[in-house]
Image (spheres, rainbow, N blue to C red):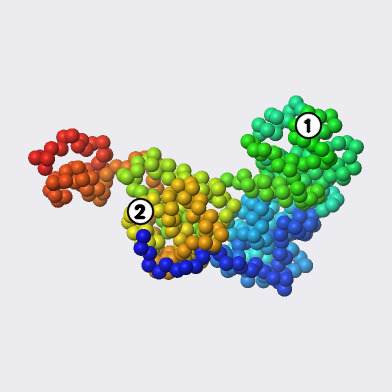
């Protein structure tokens, strides 16, 4: 396929330093310090989850720094590079950048900040949240942060650790769609006694943060020896991770509450839903997806008259599988029908043939790469894997900017019908059947608003009638 302006460069995002430094009043947060700095703090926190490549984040950065300086000593202002620490972003449901959360009285249930992006708006919101926090404290409300602080964590609720036995293990753990972290312990074991408060505190936090999608359990291996034997338990405590349909894996992390919670949140992020696959219906859809995400993956699918609903759905299913496979990447996923967005096709060098086609666009650099292999799970996986490791050739988006996008009606999920403007497609199809008949010799098709292909009976069309 001929593409103008092909450049031998990588589409992968170059290493970018964070937007904040030690000289700023913005506290840089990560999985190692988030629990101690924010969750266990009595202070009110405003936390921005950002990505260094995000244009909106770059625009916000100077305002965020100004707000942090103005609020110094009053309200804590922090920032998380959620592109680098995606498990921490996933823990708080961050799906786009920047996302701002207010950690107030109950640190385990932060509020979304919905205000303006100016330093004044941010400061006003912080002071309003602080006023509410003080009012709650005067009224005797302490939120969820004062229930104990041992080893960087609270006492938790023992009921949040599910007691597992020989009798209930299979139906509770193995048959569950949730992820389980299970501790095998012995009551006499000193290390188990030390782990118990950390395990309990982690169970409570993980339950709240994952809405019960990751659970912590415990098995007294001295009583339920059948389970201990089944899973080869030789020492205590032993922690294993169980996911439905998979072999259990050994937990190799630390034994503090924060270590356990961090691993649980990684497991949770593995199970988050894939990004939405959207049809390009207007300019806003393309612009928002390509500007808010590191890459936008765009497929141009064959016209509905060429594939029917079943054929199109098979292509969309492949895209959904790939979106799920790469859901931890900050990528947007879009599709359009061949001919619906001709300026887009032209800017990507797709040019009206070779459908289905796929392109990955880096809107910050206005570079793109095209799928060269098959439009299949294997072909697309290879294409995206190459992008992930920085290999493959790229080209400049035609015109150096995102193209004009037509506003179109969404696909109704049905097989196509021939409209007046597409009736020429029927002529072309029929001309292939009658090689001796000139294209222009066909009579006019009925001038109806829509012509169902099932109404065209080819058996009734004789050559001598044409």
| Lateral position of residue 142 relative to residue 389, left or right | right
Residue 213 on image: x %, y %: 67, 41
Residue 387, label in figure: none
Determine the residue positioned at 49% across, 57% down: 296
Please tell me which residue lies in front, 138 or 344: 344
* Quadrant of the rendering where the C terminus is positioned: top left
| Lateral position of residue 149 relative to residue 173, left or right | right
Please name the residue that numbered disc 2 is placed on.
Answer: 354
Residue 71 makes an appearance in the image = yes
Q: Earlier in the sequence, mark 2 or mark 1?
A: 1
Q: Which residue ends up furthest to the top in the rendered image?
A: 167
Mark nearest the camera among 2 and 1 is: 1
Determine the residue positioned at 16% across, 50% down: 439
Determine the residue positioned at 56% across, 64% down: 13
At numbered mark 2, what does the secondary structure look like: helix, strand or loop?
loop
Q: Which residue ends up furthest to the left in the rendered image?
A: 464
Q: Quadrant of residue 123?
A: bottom right
Q: Height in image: 438 above or below 127?
A: above
| Lateral position of residue 388 relative to residue 69, left or right | left
Residue 379 on image: x %, y %: 47, 50
Residue 174 on image: x %, y %: 68, 33
Residue 165 makes an appearance in the image = no
Q: Height in image: 154 above or below 351?
A: above
Within 10 Å of disc 1 (Cα), the crowding (few <14, some 14-19, many 20+) is few
Q: CA distance from mark 2 to mark 1?
A: 57 Å
Determine the residue positioned at 20% across, 35% down: 457
At numbered mark 1, what does the secondary structure look like: helix, strand or loop?
helix
Q: Which residue ends up furthest to the bottom in the rendered image?
A: 23
Residue 423 on image: x %, y %: 23, 47
Please name the residue that numbered disc 1 is placed on.
Answer: 229
Please tell me which residue lies in front, 1 or 302: 1
* Quadrant of the rendering where the N terminus is positioned: bottom left
């Amino acid at each position: 396929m001929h593409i103008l302006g092909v450049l031998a460069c990588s589409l992968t995002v170059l290493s970018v330093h964070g937007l904040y430094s030690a000289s700023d009043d913005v506290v840089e947060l990560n999985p190692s310090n988030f629990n101690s700095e924010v969750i266990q703090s009595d202070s009110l926190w405003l936390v921005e989850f950002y990505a260094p490549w995000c244009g909106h984040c770059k625009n916000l950065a100077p305002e965020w720094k100004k707000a942090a300086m103005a609020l110094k000593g009053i309200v804590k202002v922090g920032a998380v590079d959620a592109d680098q620490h995606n498990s921490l972003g996933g823990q708080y449901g961050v799906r786009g950048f920047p996302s701002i959360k207010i950690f107030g009285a109950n640190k385990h249930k932060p509020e979304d900040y919905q205000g303006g992006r100016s330093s004044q708006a941010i400061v006003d919101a912080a002071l309003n949240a602080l006023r509410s926090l003080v009012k709650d404290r005067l009224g005797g409300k302490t939120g969820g942060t004062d229930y104990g602080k041992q080893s960087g964590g609270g006492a938790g609720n023992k009921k949040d650790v599910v007691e597992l036995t020989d009798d209930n293990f299979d139906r509770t753990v193995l048959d569950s769609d949730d992820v389980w972290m299970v501790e095998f312990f012995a009551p006499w074991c000193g290390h188990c006694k030390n782990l118990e408060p950390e395990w309990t505190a982690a169970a409570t936090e993980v339950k709240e943060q994952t809405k019960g999608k990751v659970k912590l359990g415990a098995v007294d291996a001295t009583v339920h020896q059948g389970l201990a034997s089944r899973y080869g338990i030789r020492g205590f405590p032993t922690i294993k991770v169980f996911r439905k349909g998979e072999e259990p894996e050994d937990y190799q992390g630390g034994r503090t509450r924060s270590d356990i919670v961090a691993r649980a949140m990684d497991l949770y992020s593995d199970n988050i839903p894939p990004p939405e696959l959207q049809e390009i219906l207007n300019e806003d859809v393309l612009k928002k997806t390509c500007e808010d995400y590191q890459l936008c993956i765009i497929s141009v699918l064959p016209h509905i008259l060429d594939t029917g609903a079943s054929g199109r759905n098979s292509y969309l299913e492949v895209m959904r599988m790939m979106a799920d496979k790469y859901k931890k990447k900050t990528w947007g996923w879009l599709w359009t029908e061949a001919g619906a967005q001709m300026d887009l096709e032209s800017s990507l060098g797709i040019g009206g043939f070779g459908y289905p086609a796929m392109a990955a666009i880096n809107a910050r650099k206005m570079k793109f790469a095209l799928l060269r292999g098959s439009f299949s799970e294997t072909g697309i996986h290879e294409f995206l894997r190459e992008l992930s490791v920085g290999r493959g050739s790229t080209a400049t988006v035609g015109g150096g900017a995102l193209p004009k996008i037509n506003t179109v009606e969404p696909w109704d999920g049905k097989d196509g019908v021939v409209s007046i403007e597409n009736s020429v497609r029927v002529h072309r199809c029929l001309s292939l059947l009658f090689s001796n008949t000139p294209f222009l010799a066909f009579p006019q098709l009925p001038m109806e608003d829509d012509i169902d292909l099932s109404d065209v009976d080819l058996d009734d069309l004789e050559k001598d009638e044409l």
